[in-house]
Image (cartoon, rainbow, N blue to C red):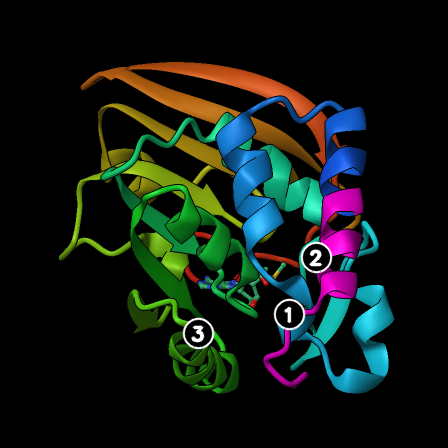
Amino acid sequence: MAEFEDSYKHRGMRKKLVKLLENKGITNHHVLNAIGKVPRHFFFDNAFVEHAYQDKAFPIGEGQTISQPYTVAFQSEYLRIKPGNKVLEIGTGSGYQACVLLELGAELHTIEYQKNLYDRTRRFLPKMGYTTNFYYGDGSKGIPSQAPFDNIIVTAGAPLVPKSLVNQLTIGGVLIIPVGDNEKQKMYRITKLSENKLKKEAFDFFSFVPLLGKEGWG
Ligand code: SAM
């Protein structure tokens, strides 16, 4: 991992990234500020630091990726988080999205299915100054013991919207989830209007690694 040095140059590159995200249509200032705060280069090996502030996904080991900044910003914006909201993130991965959610004031619960990534990230984030609740397991089933959640964000591509996740939303709660095949997925936002009424909105196509587990691809 890169040394924890956030230089003038890094901050300059981050500012440019924020401008780029604004130009691509991200409007929520809290989200843009959060992206502007989290040093994304800390998640990269020194040799790859110049990739950190490009708007692209990058391999993080175990066949997984740190999501593209635009994707992180888009999901964060459409999730409609308010400070203090109880938020579930499925797919901790590198922990970058988790840091953005923490900067937005989330009371975060984040779950990862790959043991090595879970171990790596739960040790790494506190070193950066971010503390939160890490879980190891199949997030496609949510975390029933911690439910309900005000917001649920799924950062892997699902074949269908998992019923367990809808069940674990508060009334008024919001789930953002990419649904589709292994190549591309449409982003959906599900708002739980009442116990048996949902509002479902569809947005652009994105490309995520698959959501594994019982209510994912298996
Ligand atoms: N949010 C991550 C970040 O900021 O780096 C991006 C994560 S990557 C695109 C998707 C992650 O979802 C991978 O780390 C993968 O192991 C994880 N994943 C896949 N299926 C899962 C499941 N059923 N439960 C929890 N995590 C899962």
Spatial distance from mark 2 to mark 1, Cα to Cα? 7 Å
Secondary element at tag 2:
helix
Q: Which residues are magenta?
A: 1-16
Proximity of marks 2 and 1: CB atoms separated by less than 8 Å: yes
Q: Nearer the viewer, residue 159 or 81?
A: 81
Q: Nearer the viewer, residue 199 or 217?
A: 199
Residue at (18% x, 19% y) in the render: 195
Q: Position of residue 161 (x, y in %)?
A: 47, 37
Residue at (38% x, 76% y) in the render: 126
Secondary element at tag 3:
helix
Spatial distance from mark 2 to mark 3, Cα to Cα? 19 Å
Mark closer to the observer (3, 1) = 1
> What type is the residue that disc 3 sits on?
Leu
> What type is the residue that disc 2 sits on?
Arg
Magenta stretch containing residue 13, yes or no?
A: yes
Q: Position of residue 167 (x, y in %)?
A: 24, 36
Report the side of 132 relative to 154 (left or right).
left
Reading the chain from its start, which is encountered first: label 3 or label 1?
1
Query: Residue beneath label 1, please?
Result: 6
